[in-house]
Image: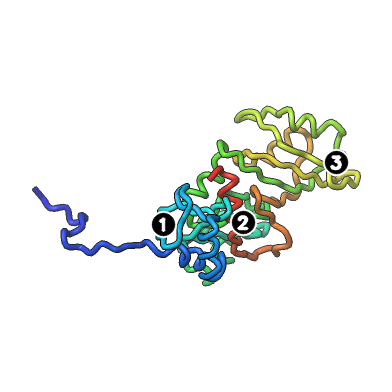
């Protein structure tokens, strides 16, 4: 039988990736080691659903850690970023046609290879999430998890008073019906208007197609939030690292 060269040798060393729990918490930015020991002592930390005790160890790559009921990502190799994608930039990390892409705005600030969560077409702008956490990215994009996304759109006006009810009831598109979770008119200036809508659909160009179908084509589209993460005052082309609280909120949004 041919030996499988990929199999580990019998005498290959086995590396223990577990660490003292207070050390993992401190490395994740929860607080000083002394403060983290106090959290453990006060039974505010769980590992895989079990209340932790002083002296416990955990593996940040496998174990699920919660502090005060909120998921803590203790694996420091994982990166979570928010980006304000400018208009004219394609939602790929690199573009074979030489167009401006997402990696052009990262430079050397991120050592890890990250991927975008969902897409915005080149003419759209606003919030994108970038991460190397494939499991979380999949859940954020899958419609079964119901993660809402909010968009601010400039559209052709005027806006009829019943448009919100019509969008909430559902509109039939060529690839199936779609309905919004919320809708409001932000501003109306005669022939143009600003509207905000929230939905958890992820189909291609869904917002533009939906508003065009009801007679209000979009001239500008900005995504302002994904689940609990908001664009805020992040400038176009800039990125920022999500806080521990924001990452925990994303896990909560997908039921983890």
For marks 2 and 1, give the CA distance: 19 Å
Label 2 Cα neighbours within 10 Å, binned few <14 / some 14-19 / many ≥20: some
> Could you tell whether 48 is left or right of 155 in the image?
left
Q: Nearer the viewer, residue 213 or 165?
A: 165
Instruction: Say which residue label 2 marks.
Output: 246
- CB-based contact (under 8 Å), mark 2 and mark 1: no
Does 150 sit left or right of 119 as displayed? Answer: right
For disc 3, the neighbor class at 10 Å (few under 14, some 14 to 19, many from 20) is some
**How far is mark 3 from mark 1, CA to CA?**
51 Å
Residue 26 numbered tag: none
Q: Residue furthest left?
A: 1
Q: Earlier in the sequence, mark 2 or mark 3?
A: 3
- Can residue 105 be seen? yes
According to the picture, the residue beneath numbered tag 3 turns out to be: 157
**Residue 45 in the image: x percent, y percent?**
52, 55
For the residues bearing labels 3 and 1, Cβ distance under 8 angstroms? no
Residue 81 x, y percent position in the rendering: 58, 60
Secondary structure beneath label 1: loop
Q: Residue furthest front?
A: 41
Q: Indicate the secondary structure of the residue bearing disc 2.
A: helix
Side of 180 where 22 appears, left or right: left
Q: Estimate the spatial distance between the alpha carbons at disc 2 and disc 3, rounded to whole Å.
A: 36 Å
Q: Is residue 115 left or right of residue 171?
A: left
What residue do we see at 47% from left, 47% from top? 49
Q: Which residue is mark 1?
A: 61
Residue drawn at (50%, 68%) of the image: 27
Closer to the camera: disc 3 or disc 1?
Answer: 1
Sequence order check: which comes first, mark 3 or mark 1?
1
Tag 3, which secondary structure?
Answer: loop
Q: Nearer the viewer, residue 109 or 190?
A: 109
User: What is the x, y in percent for residue 19?
Assistant: 40, 64
């Amino acid at each position: 039988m041919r030996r499988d060269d990929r199999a580990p040798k019998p005498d290959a060393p086995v590396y223990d990736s577990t660490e003292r729990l207070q050390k993992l918490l401190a490395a994740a930015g929860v607080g000083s080691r002394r403060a983290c020991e106090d959290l453990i002592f006060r039974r505010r930390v769980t590992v895989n659903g079990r209340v932790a005790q002083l002296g416990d160890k955990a593996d940040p790559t496998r174990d699920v850690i919660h502090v005060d009921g909120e998921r803590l990502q203790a694996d420091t190799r994982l990166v979570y970023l928010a980006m304000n994608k400018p208009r004219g930039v394609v939602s790929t990390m690199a573009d074979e046609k030489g167009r401006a892409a997402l990696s052009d705005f990262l430079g050397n600030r991120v050592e890890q290879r990250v991927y975008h969560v969902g897409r915005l077409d080149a003419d759209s702008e606003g919030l994108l999430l970038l991460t190397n956490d494939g499991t979380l990215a999949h859940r954020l994009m899958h419609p079964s998890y119901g993660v809402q996304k909010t968009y601010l759109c400039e559209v052709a006006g005027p806006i009829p008073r019943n448009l919100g009810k019509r969008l909430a009831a559902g509109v039939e598109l060529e690839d199936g019906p779609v309905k919004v979770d919320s809708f409001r008119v932000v501003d109306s200036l005669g022939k143009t208007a600003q509207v905000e809508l929230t939905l958890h659909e992820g189909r291609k160009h869904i917002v533009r197609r939906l508003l065009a179908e009801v007679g209000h084509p979009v001239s500008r589209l900005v995504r302002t939030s994904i689940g609990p993460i908001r664009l805020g005052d992040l400038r176009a082309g800039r990125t920022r690292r999500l806080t521990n609280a924001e990452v925990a909120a994303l896990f909560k949004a997908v039921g983890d």
